[in-house]
Image: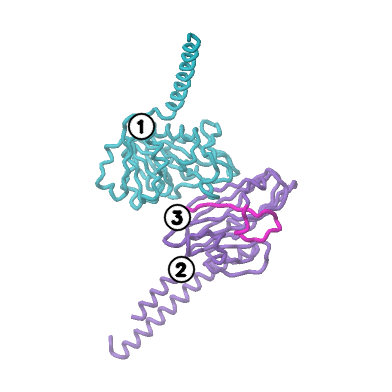
């Protein structure tokens, strides 16, 4: 009987780790005035329709808190557009930004899943946009990798750009429910590294170990039962 | 006395001409099919788009709402138009899009309907009200960039690489960094079109990606009216 519970636990674990995630955690745009640049975001395990919200800090000195971001893109002369493509259980989102005013702007793009029962899952990707008269481009390492991040994700070191995944157990928007926010600070490069480690290395390894343990336990029980003469 | 009669006659004339102008203008949008019946197919009654239904009614249709579970028992052939809402249907193949004159405003089941390959439809949104390219002219289709609060209004499009080969593109996506005409926001499939799922249409289909009826501009309404006329032809 116990063995069935063990397998049930494994099934539960697998479904838990393959839940909603996103990559990268932040996008850095450095662009010339009135020039558009696009970068990609991948949402994994998201099949439902999502609402897209973008919010901006009043100035670049403001704290990196979604709740503090109350401005619209237009108030900074920014124009943002996005396109979403569904492929199997993932969503690939192209985010394009252009601006007409020089300066540094901090914002977040929030992907809000439709309400399921009592809960809403919101994922937020930080946006840092620097508009200059010189043309410079820098990618934050987006597009090439996908990342599965569980609710209480790891915290890395650097602060330049922050990651935020919001998951609240009520219908309040995340901004009004700061306790539900899980914050992690990391550079885009680190995020890419983490996503590679997690998806391509850690996850299969964990699954293999679990499978091995399960087989071991099962054969041990079988052996015990056989030696006791039950089989 | 004569003056009063003349003045009131003049006023009457002015009012009559104003009313006539107003009527002609509204007829441009509404006069299509009179006293026809249409079915609006939905899965979740909470997600029925009442703005869309009201507009279809102004086009002269009596709308019957049919839930997906009622489809096997419903006689869809008695309707002049079937409208498929933007919901993830459990058994999309049972809707038999292509057997009936249909308007598809849906991005979940486009592959099953044969309008795209397996990759399905895509979504476009922006911080400014969205446009489409119709007849090589940029046309604003939403009156606002936001659906509610700060949630952006978007539309569905069929990406160039995903759209069924035989569809006729009527309106394209607004130009972005991804290029011009990288997707189709409105597409027609005439009778006899072989769809991506291998089925041949017996009736016309119009795919209409501009799904936020609440925000439609007059131009978007005209595009939708054309779409309905094509499908119900």
In space, the residues marked 2 and 3 are separated at their CA atoms by: 17 Å
- Chain identifier of the residue bearing label 3 in the image: A
- Is-magenta flag for residue A58? yes
Frontmost residue, B46 versus B36: B46
Rendered image: mark on residue A117: none
Q: Residue at x 35, y 88 (%)?
A: A224
Q: Which chain is cyan?
A: B
Vertical comparison of B86 with B202: above or below: below
Mark 2 = which residue? A16
Relative to A120, A66 lies left or right: right
Residue range (magenta):
A49-70
Give the class, few, some or many, for how many residues have Cα within 10 Å of label 1's Cα (few <14, many ≥20): some
- Looking at the rendering, in which quadrant would you find the C terminus of chain A? bottom left
Where is residue B155 drawn, in percent x and y?
49, 44
Q: Which chain is purple?
A: A
Where is residue B5 drawn, in percent x and y?
46, 12
Mark 1 = which residue? B60
- Looking at the rendering, in which quadrant would you find the N terminus of chain A? bottom left
Frontmost residue, B90 versus B24: B24
Frontmost residue, B142 versus A80: B142
Mark nearer the viewer, 3 or 1:
1
Evaluate whether residue B188 shows in this view: yes
- Chain identifier of the residue bearing label 2 in the image: A
Mark 3 = which residue? A48
- Is-magenta flag for residue A185? no
Give the class, few, some or many, for how many residues have Cα within 10 Å of label 2's Cα (few <14, many ≥20): few
| Residue furthest out toward the right | A134
């Amino acid at each position: 009987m116990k063995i069935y519970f063990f397998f049930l636990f494994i099934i539960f674990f697998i479904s838990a780790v393959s839940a909603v995630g996103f990559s990268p955690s932040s996008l850095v745009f450095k662009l010339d005035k009135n020039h558009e640049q696009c970068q990609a975001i991948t949402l994994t395990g998201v099949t439902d329709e999502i609402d897209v919200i973008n919010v901006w800090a009043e100035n670049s000195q403001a704290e990196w808190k979604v709740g503090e971001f109350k401005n619209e893109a237009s108030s900074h002369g920014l124009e943002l557009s996005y396109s979403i493509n569904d492929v199997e259980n993932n969503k690939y989102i192209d985010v394009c930004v252009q601006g007409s005013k020089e300066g540094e702007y901090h914002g977040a793009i929030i992907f809000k899943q439709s309400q399921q029962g009592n809960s809403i899952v919101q994922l937020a990707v930080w946006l840092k946009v620097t508009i200059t008269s010189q043309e410079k481009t820098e990618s934050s390492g987006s597009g090439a990798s996908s990342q599965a991040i569980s609710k209480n994700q790891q915290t890395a070191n650097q602060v330049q750009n922050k990651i935020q995944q919001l998951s609240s157990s009520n219908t309040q928007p995340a901004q009004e429910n700061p306790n539900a926010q899980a914050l992690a600070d990391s550079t885009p490069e680190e995020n890419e590294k983490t996503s590679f480690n997690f998806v391509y290395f850690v996850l299969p390894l964990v699954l293999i170990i679990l499978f091995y343990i399960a087989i071991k336990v099962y054969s041990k029980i079988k052996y015990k039962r056989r030696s006791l003469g039950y089989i | 006395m004569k003056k009063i009669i003349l003045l009131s006659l003049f006023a009457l004339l002015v009012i009559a001409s104003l009313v006539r102008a107003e009527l002609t203008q509204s007829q441009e949008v509404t006069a299509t099919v009179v006293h026809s019946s249409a079915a609006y197919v939905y899965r979740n009654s909470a997600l029925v788009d009442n703005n869309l239904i009201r507009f279809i009614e102004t086009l002269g249709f009596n709308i019957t709402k049919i839930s997906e579970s009622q489809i096997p028992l419903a006689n869809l052939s008695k309707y002049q138009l079937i409208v498929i809402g933007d919901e993830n249907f459990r058994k999309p193949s049972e809707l038999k899009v292509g057997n009936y004159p249909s308007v598809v405003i849906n991005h979940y089941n486009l592959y099953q309907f044969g309008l795209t390959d397996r990759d399905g439809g895509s979504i476009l949104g922006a911080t400014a009200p969205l446009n489409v390219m119709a007849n090589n002219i940029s046309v604003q289709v939403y009156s606002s960039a936001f659906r509610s609060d700060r949630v952006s209004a978007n539309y569905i499009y069929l990406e160039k690489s995903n759209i069924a080969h035989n569809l006729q593109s009527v309106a394209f996506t607004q130009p972005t960094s991804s290029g011009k005409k990288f997707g189709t926001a409105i597409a027609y499939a005439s009778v006899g079109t072989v769809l991506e799922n291998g089925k041949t249409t017996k009736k016309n289909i119009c795919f209409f990606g501009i799904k936020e009826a609440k925000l439609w501009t007059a131009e978007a309404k005209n595009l939708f009216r054309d779409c309905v006329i094509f499908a119900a032809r």
